[in-house]
Amino acid sequence: MARAASAVIEVVDDAVEDAPVLHASIYEELRRRLITGKIVPGVGLSTRGLAAELGVSQMPVRDALSRLAAEGAVEIRSKRKIIVPPMTPERFDDLLHCRMLLEPDAAAQALPRLGAVGVRRLAEIDAGMDVALASGDVLAYMEGNFAFHFTIYRAGAAAIQTRLIETLWLQFGPFMRVVYGRFGTANLVDQHRVALDAIEAGDAEALRAAIAGDIRDGMGLIARNSWA
Amino acid sequence: MARAASAVIEVVDDAVEDAPVLHASIYEELRRRLITGKIVPGVGLSTRGLAAELGVSQMPVRDALSRLAAEGAVEIRSKRKIIVPPMTPERFDDLLHCRMLLEPDAAAQALPRLGAVGVRRLAEIDAGMDVALASGDVLAYMEGNFAFHFTIYRAGAAAIQTRLIETLWLQFGPFMRVVYGRFGTANLVDQHRVALDAIEAGDAEALRAAIAGDIRDGMGLIARNSWA
DNA sequence: GGACTTTAGCTGCGATCCCAATTTTGTCAT
DNA sequence: ATGACAAAATTGGGATCGCAGCTAAAGTCC
């Protein structure tokens, strides 16, 4: 046993090439599933189930879940239950607040280090998101959104700050997926153009405002519609 | 075996009462050791060594280290080496920057929820820190400093933000300990009085400024003296 | 037929075993 | 004495096993 589910093994291998350390692959895989919303809140994970699904023993899964628990992406409910914590209004506000504190600043920091190549890459991602929006492909939209923001942040020197932001996204992802799934992507406006303009103009304050607006727009109205 | 080192078991038990889950106790214990600077950067941890020292098997230690690695408090250097990452100027600036973004805001948020009891508790902690400063007790000073800041932050509703800040402190602790050990606590000024005044006055902006000043003072000059 | 009790099957957690890799140490040749 | 190379010991990572706890479903009694 433990050599089953070769299809899912391929997913993991695909995510991190061949695995230098296994539990890191699992961690990355689960992380990607969370950020892109492939795992919805409320459902229970199980080390044995995930292990079987990924074709490994439960040990590396445990390690990965441990790390995710440290980041607040999953929760160990007392004993015998590991779940993706459901979103609450308080948590949502808290998360949103932290994003507003960290992300505009991170973007402004990264601005001087975004060269012409960075702008072009961002433009490509943005174009892809337009397609995803038009075709209603929620998954592609979320991946594009993630890529857009983090190609900016990662261009900056603030590795720790970027990591903190990742942690926040990790907690948002599952919830966003559910929301998008319920409302569709039709009424999502593409706020990234403004950010791109600010970057090309080299205007740090405008970029700050653009990112802040993107966050507020993308999540603000969603928040209002979700606990009615 | 695995039932040795009862003395250290007591340390763990003392830290978290009796242990509901073991790996959580280990995690808390290591976390405390890091924040209070009992573990210095550069030294290598070993799962087996820690396991023996704490009187458990290496499994819960692995879990705990995994979590700490997720938070950046320890680093898994390739294979076969787990270390507390040494501080670099870049990391230091990054950390400091994040603290400035998150902590003043967290304090301002917590301000309305700090009642008279909160103020009294803070005053007590501050008094304890004065004693620690006078007697040159680095460890007590660091514990007091931690207690002071986090009784403020935890009074607020922003659980995630507080957790983020804890992550930052976790990475600072070991380094601070070394610095204090080298320079002593003699030239540390107590910035907390200003914060206390701001809290009693209910002045959010003043509190923001006080916390920011505290961070800048406590670490700014240290930074300058440490890579000369 | 409904409600309570019991039991059986999962669950996560900790211990132990094993392995590959790396670091360290010891030895031999220069 | 010093260098390199090889062998051994220690490391982290993964797999497997066993245990205690909770959950839920089945069974029983009124």
Image (cartoon, coloured by chain):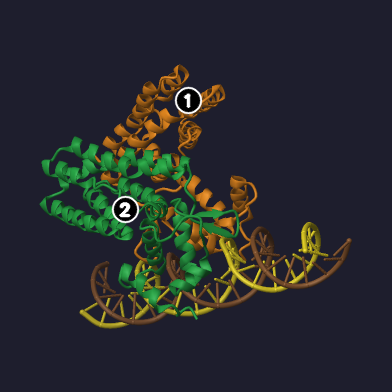
Chain colours: A green, B orange, C yellow, D brown
Image mark for residue A81: none
What is the x, y in percent for residue B210?
37, 24
> Could you tell me residue A135's position as x and y percent?
26, 60
Kindly identify which residue carries mark 2.
Answer: A185
**Pair 2/1: label in front:** 2
Asked whether the residues under the numbered discs 2 and 1 touch, taking CB atoms below 8 Å apart as contact, a structural biologist would say no
Nearest the viewer among B103 and A89 is A89
Vertical order, A11 against B152 (above or below): below
Dot 2, crowdedness within 10 Å: few (<14), some or many (≥20)?
some
**Residue B112 disc label:** 1
Compared to C13, does A114 lie above or below? above
Disc 2 is placed on an element classified as: loop
Measured as percent of width and height from the top left, residue A55 is found at: 44, 75
Q: Residue at x 55, y 21 (%)?
A: B116
Q: CA distance from mark 2 to mark 1?
A: 39 Å
Mark 1 burial class by Cα count in 10 Å: few <14, some 14-19, many 20+: some
- Residue B184 image point, x, y percent: 40, 33
Q: Residue at x 33, y 34 (%)?
A: B100
Q: Which chain letter goes with mark 2?
A: A
Q: Amino acid at mark 1?
A: Pro
Q: Chain of mark 1?
A: B
Count of numbered badges drawn on the protein: 2
Which amino acid, by three-letter code, is at mark 2?
Thr
Q: In the image, A147: left or right of B81?
A: left
Image position of B14 (left or right of B184): right
Q: Nearer the viewer, residue C16 or A4?
A: A4
Q: Secondary structure at mark 1?
A: helix
**Residue in the image at 57% along x and 24% along y:** B117
Q: Quadrant of residue A20?
A: bottom left
